[in-house]
Image (cartoon, rainbow, N blue to C red):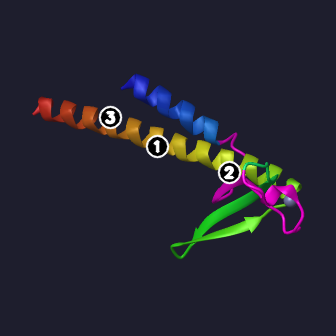
């Protein structure tokens, strides 16, 4: 039990250091341009980019937005922070479940 408490407190403390978070995902895509004579429209020739896109779900639908380099750098970090938060919460849930099992089993044995 002491070890669960220790692990849990460590995770909870790490959350206090967490920076801002952002929803959705960031992708970088290569795209052809619209200039007729550009080689990028030929198969096998590299396209332009990568361009940073942010995607999220709004009412079950995927919404996509082209970002500036400045936005992409910021949101990339914030999305990374959110993933870290989600992973930490998952671990805290797992430890809590183990702790509950331990506590409830111990109590049963006492009766
Ligand atoms: Zn092109």
Q: What residue do we see at 69% from left, 43% from top?
A: 18
- Let me know if residue 32 is in the magenta part: yes
What residue would you read off at disc 2? 79
Q: What residue do we see at 48% from left, 33% from top?
A: 8
Place residue 38 in its image quadrant: bottom right
Residue farthest to the bottom, as pictured: 59
Q: Front-most of 41 and 30?
A: 41
* For discs 3 and 1, the disc positioned in front in the rendered view: 1
Quarter of the image containing the N terminus?
Answer: top left
Q: Tell me where residue 74 appears, x and y as whole percent.
A: 81, 52
Horizontal relation, residue 95 to residue 9: left or right: left
Q: CA distance from mark 2 to mark 1?
A: 17 Å
Q: Front-most of 94 and 28?
A: 28
Secondary structure of residue under mark 1: helix
Residue 98 got which mark? 3
The tag earlier along the polypeptide, 3 or 2, is 2
The tag earlier along the polypeptide, 3 or 1, is 1
Q: What residue do we see at 61% from left, 36% from top?
A: 13
Horizontal relation, residue 30 to residue 34: left or right: left
Q: Is residue 81 visible?
A: yes
Horizontal relation, residue 48 to residue 64: left or right: right
Q: CA distance from mark 3 to mark 1?
A: 13 Å
Q: Which residues are magenta?
A: 16-43
Residue 92 drawn above or below residue 71: above
Q: Front-most of 10 and 106?
A: 10
Place residue 34 in its image quadrant: bottom right
């Amino acid at each position: 039990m002491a070890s669960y408490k220790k692990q849990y407190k460590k995770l909870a403390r790490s959350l206090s250091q967490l920076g801002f978070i952002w929803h959705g995902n960031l992708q970088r895509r290569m795209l052809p341009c619209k200039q007729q004579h550009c080689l990028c429209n030929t198969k096998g020739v590299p396209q332009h980019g990568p361009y940073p896109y942010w995607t999220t779900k709004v009412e079950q639908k995927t919404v996509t937005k082209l970002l500036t380099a400045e936005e992409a750098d910021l949101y990339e970090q914030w999305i990374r922070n959110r993933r870290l938060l989600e992973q930490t919460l998952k671990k805290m849930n797992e430890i809590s479940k183990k702790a509950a099992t331990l506590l409830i089993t111990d109590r049963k044995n006492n009766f």
